[in-house]
Image: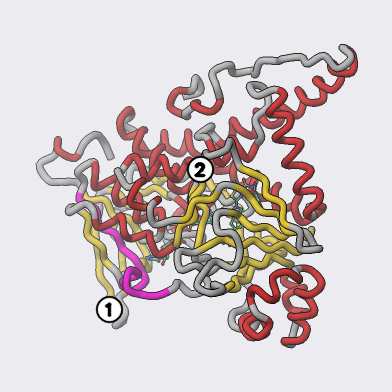
Amino acid sequence: MEGSPERHSKKKVVAVVGGGLVGALNACFFAKRGFDVEVFETREDIRQAKIVKGRSINLALSHRGRQALKHVGMEEKIVSQGIPMHARMIHSLSGKQSPIPYGKKGQVNLIILSQNTSLLFAETYPNTKLNFDHKLQDWSAETGLMTFVRPDGSTEEVEADLIVGCDGAFSAIRKQFLRRSRFNYSQTYIPHGYMELTMPPINEEFAMKPNYLHIWPRNTFMMIALPNMDKTFTCTLFMPFEEFEKITTGDEVIEFFQKYFPDTIPLIGADALRRDYFRLPAQAMVSVKCSPYHIGDKCVLMGDAAHAVVPFYGQGMNAGFEDCIVFDEIMDRFNAVLPEYTRVRVPDDHAIADLAMYNYIEMRAHVNSKWFLFRKHVDNFLHFLMPRAVIPLYTMVTFTRTRYHEAVERWHWQDKVIHFEKIIVIWDSFEVVTLSSPRTNGVCDSHWVNNSSF
Ligand code: FAD
Ligand code: EGU
């Protein structure tokens, strides 16, 4: 696929398969460029449907995601529908709550969004058509012909100039990639599952402080709560499947919460807890890495279809949104857009998949509330001492557009600096030494397009 659509007599058709968060946003990017966009989504009109079953209903939107929304003029519209988050709130076993800010005072760039906001954006451009009740069954990499199944069992054939696979972690588009030579693929299910529980409002107000990511770190057990616009919290309990299965009665649920999350029992409600724990089974989490992301000039994968990551960095959607910006920027500069997209994006998506997995392993191994507080304070303190040389990893990942793979490199490098620094500090009897970073252009405004590696 090349250049701008206007050059051709017939407008080029882009088929976005999957109308989740990434598909919906991608539709805007292509529509803005003047392509005719067709979105195909298995589900019925999700704008009317209630909560998506078994799906996380709220998500943390951070800098990368916001930048992507900004590119298509959606940032304000979406952000106004979310709840700003300033800090984490760490809940210790004794019920003590300790806030740890994400950045400088007054700086808010983390927003809690609801999954159902997604298709809000797809309606803004008139050259976008939404096709619900269209499940992709198969497609041909040779012809680009796609076959969709309708709810009545009939099939429909559709042709497009470009197919954009945004159909999530179990992508049907990706199946054709798997049949090809030299396609690398790996998937890993982690031993943990997650379960979502709702914490209702108390006297029509939030049961806990709303502008925080509430965290109960208990090593192998962990709970996270995010606020919703309706003043409820969604609590997500993470634990090994075998532990979920050990709990078989309402009393055991209460006993378990009494032991690990006692402060949440009155807030969720003992009766609700007994009931809701058994409503849905725990959900699995999978990490998927693959490469390349494209086939010829016909098809490209983005979002979870290209890289499902475990949720331990809050970056899955953000990375998928950033995919859209990266692709869009490449369209400005290259004729062979698809191979360039694979070349540039694969190392970054693989880096965030690794980081999220690493954080999962670290948190389940030894992160209790004391350790979490200690680590974040150490990070913040080092940053305070050496603001240019040491930037916490979560800051680079969550609050900048530093390429993910560069954030990882810098993090490894910083580790060395910190050890080196310790030696110098001892040597110089506590005189503060300043070091400059390997790349002196501030990491905070380093965009991938400005980097020398491009
Ligand atoms: P999906 O949201 O999975 O959308 C895919 C769409 O394709 C769906 O609508 C589906 O119906 C459709 N589809 C599937 N198959 C077909 C087919 N054959 N034909 C047509 N349509 C099809 N990310 C963050 O950034 N921040 C967070 O705080 C965060 N928290 C998370 C917490 C949990 C517990 C989990 C599990 C994930 C979290 N994530 C978070 C990750 C985030 O949910 C995903 O990365 C994001 O939803 C991916 O969007 P997507 O559009 O690529 O895929
Ligand atoms: C996990 C599940 C705290 C929503 C990672 C932090 C997350 C979210 C953290 C979920 C954690 C973990 C970061 C943000 C965010 C932290 C982050 C994680 C949103 C390293 C509903 N994570 N998440 N890191 O720093 O960078 O606060 O499901 F507990 S937001 Cl696991 Cl910043």
Q: Position of residue 9 (x, y in %)?
A: 10, 42
Instruction: Decide whether residue 145 is among the magenta residues.
Output: no
Q: Quadrant of residue 334?
A: top left
- The residue at which mark 1 appears reads as 154
Q: Is 430 displayed left or right of 327 in the figure?
A: right
User: In what element is the residue under mark 2?
Assistant: loop
The label nearer to you, 2 versus 1, is 2
Q: Position of residue 144 (x, y in %)?
A: 30, 54
Relative to 14, residue 39 above or below: below
Which residue is at 68% across, 31% downward?
411
Give the residue at the far left of this rendering: 9
Q: CA distance from mark 2 to mark 1?
A: 49 Å
Instruction: Decide whether residue 41 is among the magenta residues.
Output: yes
Give the residue at the far top of this rendering: 428
Q: Position of residue 3 (x, y in %)?
A: 24, 34
Q: Answer yes or no: is residue 181 visible.
A: no
Which residue is at 46% across, 53% downward?
177
Q: Position of residue 191 (x, y in %)?
A: 72, 64
Which range of residues does the magenta coloring cover? 36-50
- The residue at which mark 2 appears reads as 108
